[in-house]
Image: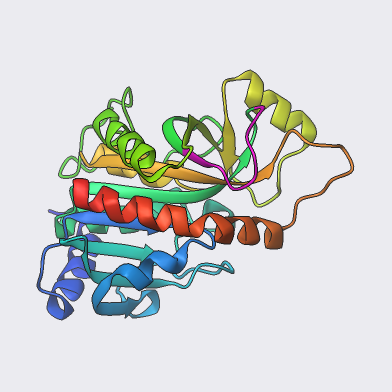
Amino acid sequence: MASELMQQLNETCNFIRTVYPHKPTVGIVLGSGLGNLVNEISIEKEINYSDIPHFPVSTVEGHSGKLLLGELSGKKVLVMAGRFHYYEGYTPQQVAYPVRVMWMLGVETLLVSNAAGGVQQGFKVGDLMIIKDHISLFTVNPLLGRNETEIGARFPDMSEPYSKVMIAKAKAIGERLGYNLKEGVYTGVTGPTFETHAEYRLIKAVGGDAVGMSSVQEVIAAVHAGMKVFAISVITDLGIREEENKITHEEVLAAAKDAEPKLTQLFKEMVAAV
């Protein structure tokens, strides 16, 4: 007998299939203030999260809360315009739920964007950092509890959570477009507080180049299901900074907006290349 999770996933996917019969092959998760990619998509169906059975509902400013289905760069895509965060009160399993829905609908490749604080010396606000690896020790793993063998193994390998092939493609695209793409390790934290100075120093000491409150749980769920993942951070603030300088969510959104045209172009070309 199917587990409760598998029953819910089937009900969600059956609902989506009734309103959109095509099979998407690329999934995209849009992060804070990074919503302009939707203008490049030939949208064939738009579904509010609140209309989808068993789907959580986004509560954060800058996240619109819609599932977009259509075509981008000649590929059928499924786009999350608005993601879910552990700090909103969702369980890690709820955060991961939409990624599992993508997998069940046929998505093979997941592109993820997020806003992150720069920890690596030399990063500037507005930089784009390709995520080559992550540190998830500060977040709760979404695979805790019963393993769904229909989705993936009990102990999934995480030695290459971000596809090296896709990273190489992104670097080549960035070089052609004249972008100075950075590369580094993303550290996932729970939020919703921005980090203390001591926490930034700790993150730097353990090898983190950037820090953020999203993505890690989504990526773990995607890797568990066998999806290829590419992720990129917009550096929206600098963690290693003068003591008196404070960070606001408004500044993060503004920095993300400034980087948006580059990220939009990069994602368009990445979809074409997968």
Residue span colored magenta: 121-129
Residue 58 among magenta residues: no
- The residue located at (19%, 66%) in the rendering is 13
- Tell me residue 271's x, y (percent): 24, 52
- Tell me residue 135's x, y (percent): 50, 29
Identify whether 185 is placed above or below 170: above
Q: Is residue 87 left or right of residue 110?
A: right
Whether residue 54 is visible here, answered yes or no, is: no
- Quadrant hosting residue 47: bottom left
Identify whether 220 is placed above or below 207: below
- The residue located at (24%, 70%) in the rendering is 69
- Tell me residue 266's x, y (percent): 36, 50
Residue 127 among magenta residues: yes
Q: Is residue 3 left or right of residue 207?
A: left
Whether residue 230 is visible here, answered yes or no, is: yes
Identify whether 227 is placed above or below 26: above
Q: Residue furthest right?
A: 244
